[in-house]
Amino acid sequence: MDIGDTPLWTREALQAATGGSLQGEPRAVTGASIDTRTLQPGDLFFAIRGEARDGHDFVQSALEKGAGAAVVAQSRAGEFAGIGPVLAVPEGGEDAVLDAMRALGIASRARSHAGIVAVTGSVGKTGTKEALRHVLSAQGETHASVASYNNHWGVPLTLTRMPETARYGVFEIGMNHAAEIVPLAAQVRPQAALVVTVEPVHIEHFRSLSAIADAKGEIFSGLEPGGVAIINRDNPNFSRLLAHAQASRAGRVVTFGEHEEADVRANRIVTRPDLSVVDATVMGVPVTYQLGTAGRHVAMNSLGVLAVVHSLGADLARAAISLAGLKPPVGRGERTALTIEDGEAFLVDESYNANPASIRAALATLAGIEVTGRGRRIAVLGDMLELGASSEQRHRELADAVRASGIDLVFTAGTMMRHLFEALPMAHRGAAAATSAELVDAVLGGLRPGDAVMVKGSNSIRMGRIVEAVKARYAGATDPRDAQFKAAP
């Protein structure tokens, strides 16, 4: 639910939380921002110092755009005298403005009576966060992280934006180094903390997969006394995560998965091109529900969603019904029907990010689409990053998943993904290029009626440009359900 025009912070609250001094009369503060490109009138603008730019250089622009006030370092406040309301905050740390935003976020959490959940995991945390936003919003005012705002500035910014009236708060917490989650979880102080899964992501910064599990397990350190730790029972690192949960202030541990001992257990999952049906048992209660998003991995994560709903005391039946209306976010499984010549084709946009586990999951989902006529299953894959010394091997190993999924043709972008391309039989090679831009024409020229094509790669490889090019040339029906595809047996 939107904050709307309701004041989010008063003058007194801003000064009390940050220790700052407000110069000038603030406009009604209804939001918060660190980027003038997306700033809305009423946003509190934080002039944070970034790697390339100093937010103080954009204060005047923020105020001209209608910012409620600008938060600046005390030593810089004089530069903005007379141009608008400025909250001058004391210095002493590495970034006074970021410290002030953290303080305001902590104050927001302290005044909140919402049911708070924190979500982390190597794969699927943003989609799971969005699913929680979706189902909880149907039951009360829900505040959640925007996009993937899950790091040292994204979490406090999200906290700062949380209205006091929110009934639920959903926070995504990410990391690529050890000890990053601890301070963020301490700010969020969740009543429920969910680890979706642990996979070899950001492995270049860790000595082992167990070390990644330890880093993910840090989320339980921030649990409120008596809170609920929610863990994927099927994950090989379950026992390691369980140890972290048991060492925390958790009152209980809830598990999910297909394991016979899971508290929230999938008894049967039926996947189709545009939806999934799950027959589950939730804390002993049989629940059958439909997901408006395809993919076995999404269905598995939905079990974690229901575990959270139960843990927060929300209505489980309503949440299960709500999942039918869940749609995949852009770049995370969005489906588009295509018109090629006189026939139809199907695009699956998984371009947001990539790692070995998520690519294997996406290939498995593509395998579930039955193509028609002379159609083929086509994977367009870009480099996976942050895999360290094992990068070449992990890209090449995807050839097994390509074969197992029955993929007919593979296009690749990037120097690392070329190792996969060369590991495939000639009959399965579409084209390989150094960049996504260089691959566009080959993909566009390689599609034909009946094809099902999936695009995926790490963010910096910019596979989204291929998705947009395909849509621009071939997008037909606006609803993928208009395409006549069936689930493979």
Image: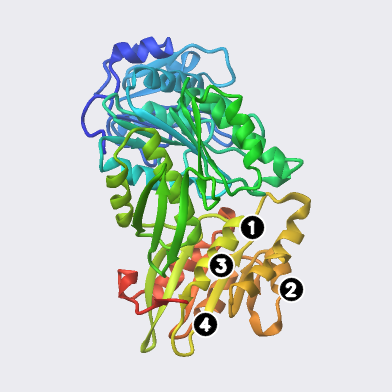
- Counting labels gives 4
Which residue does the numbered mark 2 point to in the structure image? 423
Sequence-first disc among 4 and 1: 1
Corner quadrant of residue 269: bottom left
Is 220 displayed left or right of 77 in the figure?
A: right
Which residue does the numbered mark 3 point to in the structure image? 363
The amino acid type, in three-letter code, at marker 2 is Ala
Q: How far apart are marks 4 and 2 (CA)?
A: 20 Å
Q: Distance between the residues labelled 4 and 1?
A: 23 Å
Q: Is mark 4 on a helix, strand or loop?
A: loop
The amino acid type, in three-letter code, at marker 3 is Leu
- Binning the other alpha carbons within 10 Å of mark 1 as few (below 14), some (14 to 19) or many (20 upward) gives many
- Binning the other alpha carbons within 10 Å of mark 2 as few (below 14), some (14 to 19) or many (20 upward) gives some
Sequence-first disc among 4 and 2: 4
Sequence-first disc among 1 and 2: 1
Q: Return the mark for residue 376.
A: 4
Corner quadrant of residue 402: bottom right
Q: What element carries label 1?
A: helix
Q: Which of 382 and 38 is in front in this view?
A: 382
Which residue does the numbered mark 1 point to in the structure image? 356
Q: How far apart are marks 1 and 2 (CA)?
A: 16 Å
Q: Which of 133 and 21 is in front in this view?
A: 133
Which is closer to the viewer, label 2 or label 3?
3
In this rendering, the answer to whether 205 lies above or below 442 is above
* Residue 179: image location, x then y, percent: 64, 29
